[in-house]
Amino acid sequence: MKIPTTTESLRHLPGENYIGLESIYGAEARKWRYTLNYYDKSLRKIKELDKLTFRNPVSAKTVEATPHLLFCEVSGSRIYSAFPKPGYEFLVFNLKGEFLNKITIRAKKSTDLKEYKKITDRDISGLSRFGINIIYPKYALPFYSYFTDENGYLFVMTFKAGKAEGQYMYDVISQEGKLLKKISLGPFFSNGSIPDKVLKRHLYVVREKESGKKKLLSSGFIKILKLKFQRSGF
């Protein structure tokens, strides 16, 4: 049986090249894999930037309660790649796909899994219908997902409850890897997707109407986030 592969989330970079996520999965695959690839203008794979692998949950009948996704963001002249399993770290590349550095934040271990289970249960609890046992870690992973502004600042959603109902605490990290502030935002989006963006001092969020259509809303983010981003124009 041929193991299926798909390429998704293609993003056109300034110039002619692309980045995209390639997934490899299927009952016959010993491990499932997501890779962040760098492509030329003809969508020919040039190189692999980052990779996430995990045991095939179908054959193993177990799956770790973690976001099994590789998150990529393009911000200004930088490409960011991260997934929670290795810890609180982000790989940084330039727009040519050349590795620049790794941002690593020291995070405290937490055994409080209340919010962690609330989020992961929403994302992967459906797997239990297929006889797959969900295994929770001893410690909550340091973050769930993240988004960026246009100047390379990271807004990273943690598993800590925020100050208002439905909100979660976000860590704001500079390009240099400095933890600048913790803020409460929300609600979060499931399956690792947080389509919020910060553009020109405002937070833009996507909300879906009952009709299924989506609309873009501005939340006046600069009134919430009082940071001094002199070099980026804030």
Image (tube, rainbow, N blue to C red):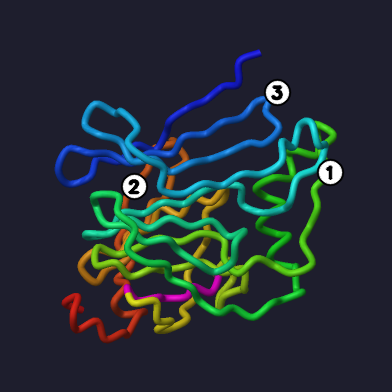
Q: Nearer the viewer, residue 71 or 17?
A: 17
**Residue that mark 3 sits on:** 28
Q: In this view, does 26 lie above or below 13?
A: above
Please state which amino acid type lies under the numbered disc 3: Glu
**Residue that mark 1 sits on:** 133
**Residue that mark 2 sits on:** 215
**Horizontally, is 17 left or right of 164 in the view?**
left
> Which range of residues does the magenta coloring cover?
168-175
Labels 3 and 1: the sequence-earlier one:
3
Residue 221, quarter of picture? bottom left
Say few, some or many: other residues with alpha carbon within 10 Å of mark 3 (under 14 / 14 to 19 / 20 or more).
Answer: some
Q: Can you tell which of label 3 and label 1 is closer to the viewer?
A: 3
The residue at 55%/79% (across/down) is 106
Which numbered disc covers residue 180? none
Q: Can you tell which of label 3 and label 2 is closer to the viewer?
A: 3
Please state which amino acid type lies under the numbered disc 1: Asn
Q: Are marks 3 and 2 in contact (CB under 8 Å)?
A: no
In three-dimensional space, the C-alpha distance between marks 3 and 2, rounded to whole angstroms, equals 41 Å
Position in image of residue 148 (x %, y %): 35, 63
